[in-house]
Image: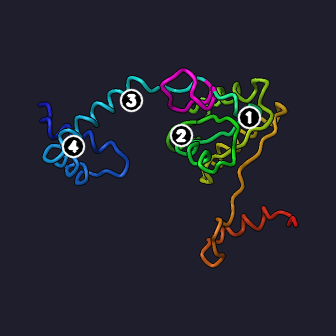
Amino acid sequence: MNPSGLEALIEALRCLPGVGPKSAQRMAYHLLQRDRSGARKLGDSLLHALHAIRHCQRCNTFTESDVCERCASPKRDQSLLCVVETPVDMNMMEQTLAYQGLYYVLMGRISPLDGVGARELGLERVMARALDGLVKEVILATNYTNEGEATAHYLTAMLRPKGIAVTRIARGIPVGGELEYVDSGTLAQALRERKNCVG
């Protein structure tokens, strides 16, 4: 027996991160009772996104063109390639206004427990992108989780023998942070990665 339209809607909403059965039920009732035009707009937007959005051929992020705006921009530094896990991570890097190079978005990270290895992540595409003759430095900006560290280590092992400079974003005390509120692991890492004072 097929689920009713309401049950199907509730179940569909549960696919969103952090949405359990109760939240999904509340959302479904809200859309049906109070915001049918919003529900229609949401449905139309989802359908349009599924049909129009694909992966950039150069950096793998989401775009509606074959090549995204960043990759097509002549203003970006072609010699720098920053590797991130997700499009959200790329957007965070952009918000710093401190980086003007190009990106490669992995759309994940190596995670053996989840069955994601180098092949599933498509790391051969990262290699092809990094070895295009223009890239001089690959900046690894994967997260400082076990999986992010494993991904960075794997990429370093792949790229260094090819003569490409490979760097890793630093970690340590956040700007405006106070030592008494920083965890000991972060503080230890900041101590190990200390730099000469300029001045």
Question: How dense is the environment of label 2, judged by Cα within 10 Å: few (below 14), some, or many (20 and up)?
Answer: some
**Residue at figure coordinates x 69%, y 44% from the top left:** 99
Q: Which quarter of the picture shows residue 35?
A: top left
Label the magenta part by its dominant secondary structure. Answer: loop
Above or below residue 108? Residue 168 is below
Residue bearing the label numbered 3: 49
Q: Are marks 4 and 1 in contact (CB under 8 Å)?
A: no
The quarter in which the N terminus is drawn is: top left
- Report the Cα–Cα distance between label 4 and label 1: 46 Å
Element carrying mark 3: helix
Q: Could you say which is closer to the camera, residue 120 or residue 66?
A: 66
Q: Are marks 3 and 2 in contact (CB under 8 Å)?
A: no
Q: Earlier in the sequence, mark 4 or mark 2?
A: 4
Residue bearing the label numbered 1: 77
Element carrying mark 4: helix
Q: Earlier in the sequence, mark 3 or mark 1?
A: 3
* For discs 4 and 3, the disc positioned in front in the rendered view: 3
Q: Earlier in the sequence, mark 4 or mark 1?
A: 4
Residue 10, numbered circle: 4
Q: Is residue 70 magenta?
A: yes
Q: Amino acid at mark 2?
A: Pro
The quarter in which the C terminus is drawn is: bottom right
Span colored in magenta = 58-72
Q: Are marks 4 and 3 in contact (CB under 8 Å)?
A: no
Question: How dense is the environment of label 3, judged by Cα within 10 Å: few (below 14), some, or many (20 and up)?
Answer: few
Q: Which quarter of the picture shows residue 155?
A: top right
Residue 87, numbered circle: 2
Above or below residue 87? Residue 23 is below
- Report the Cα–Cα distance between label 4 and label 3: 21 Å
